[in-house]
Image: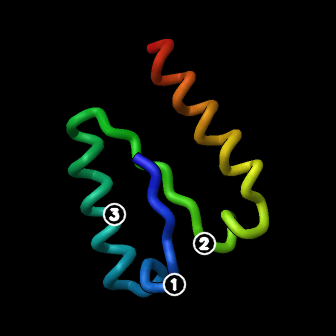
Amino acid sequence: MVELDGSQHFYEKGMIYDSNRSSELEKYGITVLRFTNLEIDRNFTGVCITIDEMVKKRIEA
C-alpha cells in the first residue's frame, strides 16, 4: 500500500494513527510505503523506483 502524507501526518495525533494503522495492516501481510508530498514533488523518479523495487521484491517472495 502506498500512502502520500501531507502535513497532518506529522502532528502527534496523525503519527500515532498512522503507526497503529500500519501495524494492523502489516498483520495481514500488507506493506505500507509512506512518502511525503515533498518527496513526491522533489524526487518523483526516486519514489517510483522505490515502489517498483518493493513490488518486485514482493513478487519474488
**CA–CA distance between discs 1 and 3?**
15 Å
- Check disc 2 and give the amino acid type: Asn
Image spot of residue 39 (x, y percent): 69, 65
Q: Which amino acid does label 3 sit on?
A: Ser
Q: Provide the residue designation for mark 2.
A: 37
Q: Nearer the viewer, residue 43 or 15?
A: 43
Q: Which of marks 2 and 1 is nearer the N terminus?
A: 1
Q: Residue at x 49, y 71 (%)?
A: 5
Whole-angstrom CA distance, mark 2 to mark 3, is 18 Å
Position of residue 22 in the picture relative to residue 37 (left or right) = left
Identify the residue at the far top of this view. Answer: 60
- The secondary structure type at the circle numbered 1 is helix
Q: SS at mark 2? A: helix
In which quarter of the view is residue 38 placed? bottom right
Q: Nearer the viewer, mark 1 or mark 3?
A: 1
Residue 53, image x, y percentages: 63, 31
**Residue 24 position within the rendered picture, expressed as x and y whole percent measured from the top left:** 21, 50
Front-most of 27 and 30?
A: 30
Residue 20 position (above or below residue 26): below
CB atoms of marks 2 and 1 within 8 Å: yes
Residue 40 coordinates in the image, percent (x, y): 67, 64
Residue at (40% x, 46% y) in the render: 1
The residue beneath circle 1 is: 7
Dot 3 lies on which element? helix
Residue that badge 3 annotates: 19
Residue at 51% over, 78% down: 6
The amino acid sitting under disc 1 is Ser
Q: Is residue 8 left or right of residue 29?
A: right
- The Cα atoms of the two marked residues, 2 and 1, are separated by 8 Å
Q: Residue at x 39, y 75 (%)?
A: 15
Whichever of callouts 1 and 3 sits on the residue coming sooner in the sequence is 1
Of the numbered discs 2 and 3, the one sitting upstream in the chain is 3
